[in-house]
Every structure is written in C-alpha cells, then in structure tokens.
Amino acid sequence: MQKRTAEEIERLVKGYEESGLSRREYCEREGMPVTTFDYYRQRATRKAAAKRRAAGLVKVKLEAAPVQASSVFTLMLANGRRIESAWNFSEADLARLIRIAEAV
C-alpha cells in the first residue's frame, strides 16, 4: 500500500475534478482503488467544510464615530450583504445578528 502525503491527495482530488473522467477511469489511470479515492474525496470534503466554518468569523476594524440620535449603523458582511439600523446593539445582540445573517 502506498502512503500518500496530504499534498498528493489534494492533487489527486483536484486532478479528478478537472479531468472529466469517471471515478473508475481516473483511478485506473492513477493506479489506485476506487474505494481509496472515495475515502480521499470524503476526507477532502470534511476538511473544506471545517475550513468554511472556521472562516465564518472575520476580523473587523472598529472606528468610533460621533453618535447622533439619527445616526445609522451599517454592517457589511463577507457575503456582500449589508445591514443598516439605527438600533444600538449590545455585544451579544450584534454577535447573534452576525451569526444569523452569515448563515443565510
């Protein structure tokens, strides 16, 4: 049995996606069992999902602005959405709002 590095596995999974071949054809070309390749793909999918979950939080820079009764709060989300409100958020409410908005 051949021990593959994480980089080799990533190359194999990416190569398959770009090849246009069936799994069986690709595995025959690369000289590996289909079951092994399926395991690599499943592992890569789990890693990508974990990476997306970890990337859900974004570092932001806060700038204090003069507070006015008619001032509007604007939050730009990583997915391009904007939330505008005159409501003064508590830290917990703001964190909840961001979690909910990013999940949609």
Image: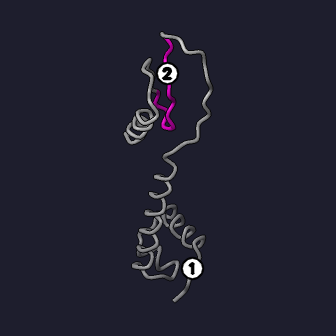
Q: Nearer the viewer, mark 2 or mark 1?
A: 2
The answer to which of 5 and 11 lies nearer the viewer is: 5
Q: Main secondary structure of the magenta part?
A: loop
Residue 57 forms part of the magenta stretch? no
Residue 71 forms part of the magenta stretch? yes
The answer to which of 22 and 52 lies nearer the viewer is: 52
Q: Residues within 10 Å of mark 2 (few under 14, many from 20)?
A: few
Q: Amino acid at mark 1?
A: Arg
How far apart marks 2 and 1 lie (CA) works out to 51 Å
Q: Which residues are magenta?
A: 70-82
What residue do we see at 40% from left, 38% from top? Answer: 96
Q: Amino acid at mark 2?
A: Phe
> Residue 31 placed where, x, y %?
51, 82
Q: In the picture shown, does residue 44 fall above or below 104?
A: below
Count of picture labels: 2
> Residue 41 placed where, x, y %?
44, 68
> Residue 50 placed where, x, y %?
46, 58
Left or right for 68, reference 102: right
What residue would you read off at disc 2? 73
Image quarter of residue 12: bottom right
> Residue 88 placed where, x, y %?
45, 22
What residue would you read off at disc 1? 4
Image quarter of residue 35: bottom left
Give the secondary structure at mark 2: strand
Q: In the picture shown, does residue 19 fall above or below 71?
A: below
What residue do we see at 50% from left, 53% from top? Answer: 54
The answer to which of 86 and 104 lies nearer the viewer is: 86
